[in-house]
Amino acid sequence: MTRPGLYGLMAEFSEPAAVVAAARKVHEAGYRKVDAFSPYPVEALTEALALPRSRLPLFVLLGGIAGLAAGYGLEYWASVIEYPMNIGGKPFHSWPAFVPPAFETTILFAALAAVLGMLALNGLPEPYHPVFNVPTFALATKDRFFLCVEATDPHFDLDRTWSFLLSLEPRVVSEVEQ
């Protein structure tokens, strides 16, 4: 059971190896609504939580393809359809001249798709999150590692989850209020 207003339970660790081991055990215990916080990227932590692969590369590819089509299409429209000019006897559709600007628009659109896709997939900007209510969470940007099990997880039971997190030997286990 859980009580109203409880977001979850958070365990604090001092070492990255400890939080990775704890994340593996939490995942093996069947908890799926789990999040981890660290002052720097820990690749093993992502693997331990079995997080799905990001869709960001697909967004970047689609942005690049859209940029290529937009750049080449704009050049074709301007040079062949709207304002054709015979310069040095070259054909109106001189594709080698279209390649460098189309390449630049490909890079531009892919970069914009990367930034906007990252913001969208990360749910940013997020000025408030319940974990900010834990006083020691400010150390997540310095030297502490946190593992949070959400109360909406099907396996979550306040007493059993609290005992389980304590068995992982964290520095402290805290309740996270909404």
Image (cartoon, grey):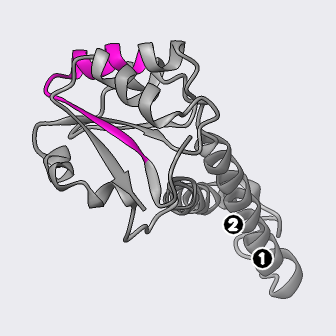
Q: Nearer the viewer, residue 4 or 104?
A: 4
Amino acid beneath label 2 = Gly
Quadrant containing the C terminus is bottom left
List x then y, in percent, for residue 176. 35, 51
Q: Quadrant of residue 146?
A: top left
User: Which badge, 2 or 1, is on the more N-terminal residue?
Assistant: 2
First to last magenta residue range: 8-24
The residue that mark 2 highlights is 71
Q: Residue at x 67, y 43 (%)?
A: 58
Pinpoint residue 78: horizontal percent, then vertical percent. Answer: 77, 80
Residue for point 82% across, 70% down: 92
- In the depicted structure, whether residue 33 falls above or below residue 61: above
**SS at mark 1 in the image:** helix
Farthest-out residue, right: 81
Question: Could you tell me the amino acid type at mark 1?
Answer: Ser
What's the distance in space between the residues labelled 2 and 1, CA to CA? 12 Å
Q: Is residue 41 above or below residue 80?
A: above
Within 10 Å of disc 2 (Cα), the crowding (few <14, some 14-19, many 20+) is: many
Residue 90 lies left or right of residue 123; in this view the side is right
> Which residue was labeled with disc 1?
79
User: Residue at horizontal 21%, vertical 24%?
Assistant: 170
